[in-house]
Image (spheres, rainbow, N blue to C red):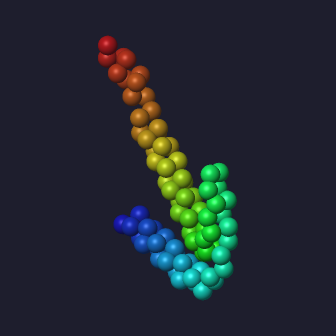
Amino acid sequence: MRRLLFIVVLVALVIVGVLFGSINQQLADLHLLIVSVQLRVVDIALIFLLLGILLGLLIALLYAIQRKTKGWLRKSADRN
């Protein structure tokens, strides 16, 4: 239940940020390694926010998997 509430609050904050950011229609150039695109400032901020959230969740997931599987190889080696 706590996780669901956290996700709902996080999504609500992102939506409110997009609504307030949609007022600013200024364009900016985003230069990547291969391509250069012209996006609104709010779109660039939203892209980097979502990438940061996904990267954080991925690191947390890998850490959780590492903690859960700690010692599995030793237990299977002891049985042989």
Q: Is residue 67 left or right of residue 25?
A: left
Closest to the observer: 38 or 66?
A: 38
Q: Quadrant of residue 72?
A: top left
Give the x, y percent position of residue 34: 62, 51
Above-or-below relation of 55 to 10: above
Above-or-below relation of 63 to 21: above
Give the x, y percent position of residue 19: 53, 83
Quadrant of the snapshot with the C terminus: top left
Give the x, y percent position of residue 18: 54, 78
Above-or-below relation of 39 to 77: below
Above-or-below relation of 63 to 77: below
Q: Is residue 47 left or right of residue 73?
A: right
Closest to the observer: 80 or 48?
A: 48
Q: Quadrant of residue 68?
A: top left
Closest to the observer: 62 or 42?
A: 42
Query: Furthest-bottom residue in view?
Result: 23
Give the x, y percent position of residue 62: 48, 43
